[in-house]
């Protein structure tokens, strides 16, 4: 393909840079499938439990909460613990939900250490859209595995995150490592 043909087809001109394409992120950037209101019927966290574990990237299911991979991960293994009940605020969780959310967070850490050798974790939740919650109407806690040196030049200078596995492969590894109670 000539330079003119490449430019016409939108592939750009060849240069010394390697390109990492992550077209799946465009859906996130555009806000596709993002709930537009508080209704449970418009909430992905309410609909995911009704499907298969593979389709929903579900890692484990409990009585009151479940864990799933983040569709737009910061690192491989970035997962979330989500109550089944459509509740927005941490203070609205009842005691059994709170206890199971905490246990699932521990189980997530155990599974990520077993499956991926995680050295550390960022754990937390963004409460409200002004705090950065992508889906503010349904509480979800992030568990992000970290490794020594994982904040290298790619995200800092290149504004690019490198994920070494497809989400389904990551889901299979972590689900297999999830503690059995």
Image (tube, rainbow, N blue to C red):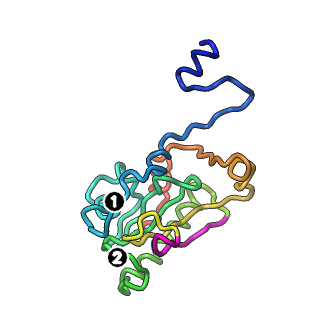
Nearest to the observer: residue 27 or residue 140: 27
Q: Is residue 117 left or right of residue 129?
A: right
Nearest to the observer: residue 127 or residue 140: 127
* Quarter of the view holding residue 45: bottom left
**Where does residue 14 sit, x and y in percent of width and height?**
68, 23
* Quarter of the view holding residue 1: top right
Q: Residue furthest top?
A: 2
Q: Is residue 170 magenta?
A: no
Q: Is residue 34 left or right of residue 41?
A: right
> Could you tell me which quadrant the C terminus lies in?
bottom left
At numbered mark 2, what does the secondary structure look like: helix, strand or loop? loop
**Where does residue 138 sit, x and y in percent of width and height?**
37, 70
The label on residue 44 is: 1
- Counting other residues with Cα less than 10 Å from the Cα at mark 2, is it few (<14), some (14-19), or many (20 or more)? some
Residue 125 seen anywhere in this rendered image of the structure: no
Which contiguous range is marked in magenta? 120-131
Asked whether disc 1 touches disc 2, contact meaning CB atoms under 8 Å apart, the reply is no
Q: Which residue lies at the image location 52% right of the left edge and 22% below the top edge?
A: 9
* Mark 1 and mark 2: Cα distance apart in space: 13 Å
Nearest to the observer: residue 123 or residue 136: 136
Residue 144 seen anywhere in this rendered image of the structure: yes
At numbered mark 1, what does the secondary structure look like: helix, strand or loop? helix
The answer to whether residue 110 is above or below residue 161 is below
Residue at the spot of label 2 = 87
* Quarter of the view holding residue 151: bottom right
**Where does residue 3 sit, x and y in percent of width and height?**
64, 16
Q: How many marks?
A: 2
The label on residue 118 is: none
Q: Is residue 125 magenta?
A: yes
Q: Is residue 93 left or right of residue 74?
A: left
């Amino acid at each position: 393909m000539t330079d003119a043909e490449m430019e016409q087809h939108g592939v750009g001109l060849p240069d010394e840079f390697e390109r990492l394409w992550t077209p799946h992120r465009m859906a996130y950037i555009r806000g596709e499938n993002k709930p537009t209101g508080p209704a449970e019927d418009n909430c992905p966290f309410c609909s995911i439990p009704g499907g298969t574990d593979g389709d929903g990237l579900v890692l484990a299911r409990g009585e009151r909460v479940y864990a799933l991979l983040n569709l737009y991960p910061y690192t491989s293994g970035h997962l979330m613990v989500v109550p089944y009940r459509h509740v927005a605020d941490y203070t609205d969780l009842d005691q059994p939900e709170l206890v199971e959310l905490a246990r699932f967070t521990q189980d997530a850490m155990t599974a990520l250490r077993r499956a991926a050798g995680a050295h550390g974790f960022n754990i937390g939740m963004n409460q409200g859209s002004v705090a950065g919650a992508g889906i503010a109407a349904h509480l979800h806690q992030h568990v992000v595995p970290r490794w020594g040196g994982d904040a290298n030049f790619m995200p800092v200078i290149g504004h690019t995150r490198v994920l070494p596995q497809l989400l389904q492969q990551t889901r299979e590894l972590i689900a297999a490592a999830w503690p059995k109670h």
